[in-house]
Image (cartoon, rainbow, N blue to C red):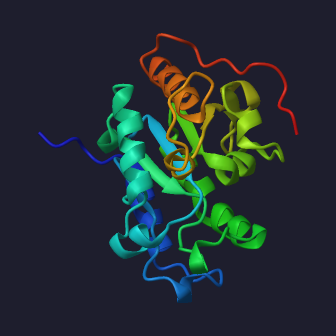
Amino acid sequence: MTAPVTAPAEALLALEARNRACTACPLRPGCTQVVVADGPLHAPLVVIGEAPGGYEDREGRPFVGPAGQLLDRILGAAGLDRRATYVTHLVKCRPPADRAPTPQETAICTDLWLRAQLALLRPRVIVTLGNAATQHLLQSHRGISTLRGRWYTYVLPGQSEPQGVPLRPLFHPAYLLRHESRLPGHPRSLTWHDIQEVAAALRGEQPPTPEGDLLF
């Protein structure tokens, strides 16, 4: 039997449809299509990257190239299913030559779309991949090497700090592809530790408690 579509899910589908027609920033004319998201409407885990690349721009889905394939393996290694995960980006259109999105482009896209996505999804855990997504959601200038390895709280609209969503930063899969070693203390082994913590939190085995103050 098919599960009924709830009001928040209907609202999310409508939001995604409006997002695909977005022309609010200068990126849209230079890309093939708006890459909104991939995954179920009731996903307990949301994964957020920076922006679509060439593979994503062609297929219309986030994280489908080599970095996406590695993301699938990272999730699978911890017993998490990509098909049960809602995956999206800060910015939904591919920047020219895969450059980093500008602060203005990021602000427009996240204010219009990402914050609304998260408010409707209300996930149990958020994972941010790499510097851009992590710094934006945490409003921090620190790098991913400093910010990973800890839990933080992302407060959705209408929430207070204790009610926020646990957020865990991970190294971006594209970065890991350039660093193949699995030695202890290396980005790949650190990512293994982080994703195991995420899986344990989703299973209810380990409370995702924020540790100390956020360093800006």
Relative to 178, 151 lies left or right: right
User: Where is residue 74 drawn, in percent x and y?
Assistant: 41, 36
Residue at image location 36% in from the left, 50% down from the top: 69
**Residue 196 visible in the displayed image:** yes
> Furthest-top residue in view?
205
Left-right relation of 26 to 102 = left
Q: Position of residue 18 (x, y in %)?
A: 47, 72
Identify which residue, 135 or 158, lies in the foreground: 135
Residue reaching furthest to the bottom: 29
Q: Residue at x 83, y 31 (%)?
A: 214
Figure quadrant of the N terminus: top left
Q: Quadrant of residue 56?
A: bottom left
Name the quarter where the C terminus is drawn. top right
Position above or below: 9 against 17: above
Left or right: where does residue 157 sit relative to residue 82?
Answer: right
Residue at point 66%, 17% (across, down): 209
Total of numbered circles in the picture? 0
Q: Position of residue 99 (x, y in %)?
A: 64, 72
Q: Position of residue 73 (x, y in %)?
A: 36, 38
The extreme left residue here reads: 1
- Residue 150 is drawn in which quadrant? top right
Q: Measured along the vertical axis of the image, is residue 195 above or below residue 126?
A: above
Q: Nearer the viewer, residue 188 or 51?
A: 188
Q: Up-down: is 122 above or below 22?
A: above
Q: Is residue 158 left or right of residue 192?
A: right
- Do we see residue 7 in this rendering? no
